[in-house]
Amino acid sequence: MNTVRAFVVPVLRRLGLLVVLLAIVFVAVDLLPGSAARSALGRDADQAELMAKEHELGLDRALPVQFWHWISGVLTGDFGQTARGSSIGALLADKFPQTLLLGGIALVLTVVLSLALGCWWALRPNAFGARVLQPATTVSVAVPEFVCGTLLILVFSLATGLLPAVTITGRSGFPAGPEMLILPVLALAIPQIGWNTRIVRSALLDVATAPHVESAVLEGLPPRTVLLRHLLPFAVPTIVAGYATSVGMLFGGALVVETLFNYPGIGAVLAGSVADRDTATVAAVVALTAIVIMALLATADFARTWASRGAR
């Protein structure tokens, strides 16, 4: 019963926060200058055409009524129409897989490298590489994805010409070649690799002071055996919590990185809908991204709870 409650309560809390966030999105877009009707019709539209378009889009209703009408449709799976008359659901279905690909690769890279580097750092704290990791991880955590991406473009595209700075879309809607994923993935992953490497190392060092670990060391077990059998199983809850935090950072940062690299994902949709003052599309992007993040956080909560019970 307690286990079920431990999952249900966070999910309900996150859903409540999501509704509040979506309401804030409606208010924020409404406060921006311009209107979706003007963006859809262009500058030459007269007042009568604008009023007719606003009525068609429901913009002549009170903002709370607009929000309730939109979120009621979302509950039935209908995200509505864009200001230009296309289906928002179809638009998201066409673009969101590319964002999932980008964020998923960055997440896998983050987990693999941070786990390897954190374990190595904990086992060899006095090695030269450990002394390099100390400032390197600090700098990587402090640098935002946008700045990291810009530096990668300067080094690997403009200075050396090794990798493309702009993503070219193939017929499938995905990047035309795997080399076009390298810089966007690195721009997303590098800050999170630095952050999680420090978390892994700290979690392992905290567990290293436990009596069962000291006994294993005194028995002369190899460092690898001590790490895999006596350190990692007890450090997993803390490590998983760090990765759960990175999920939101990766998918949130993906929207910025996609704009920088002209990546054909949901970031371009978000940028265009903000420019068009298309409230429904902006809210739909936020909602879909939040739902994916919530699902991954729920998975991380389950893994952390399972690992904690196993450790006990």
Image (cartoon, helix red, strand yellow):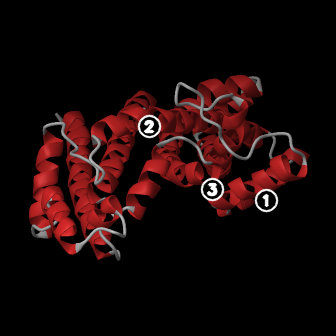
The one nearer the camera, 133 or 14, is 14
Label 3: how many Cα within 10 Å (few below 14, some 14–19, many 20+):
many
Question: Label 2 amino acid?
Answer: Lys
The one nearer the camera, 66 or 135, is 66
Disc with the residue nearer the chain's start (3 vs 1): 1
**Disc 1 secondary structure class:** helix
- What is the quadrant of the C terminus in the image? top left
What label does residue 135 carry, if any?
A: 1
Alpha carbon distance from label 2 to label 3: 21 Å
Disc with the residue nearer the chain's start (2 vs 3): 2
Question: Label 1 amino acid?
Answer: Pro
Residue 202 visible in this rendered orientation of the protein: no
Q: Position of residue 207 (x, y in %)?
A: 59, 42
Q: Mark 3 or mark 1: which is in front?
A: 3
Q: Looking at the image, which residue is at 62% across and 39% down?
A: 110
Q: Is residue 153 left or right of residue 104?
A: right
- Please give the residue where the numbered disc 3 appears in the rendered image: 145
Q: Is residue 70 above or below residue 21?
A: above
Q: Position of residue 146 (x, y in %)?
A: 63, 59
Q: Mark 2 or mark 3: which is in front?
A: 2
Alpha carbon distance from label 2 to label 1: 37 Å
Disc with the residue nearer the chain's start (2 vs 1): 2
**Disc 3 secondary structure class:** helix
What label does residue 95 carry, if any?
A: 2
Q: Looking at the image, which residue is at 77% across and 51% down?
A: 152
Label 2: how many Cα within 10 Å (few below 14, some 14–19, many 20+):
some
Q: Is residue 249 left or right of residue 10?
A: right
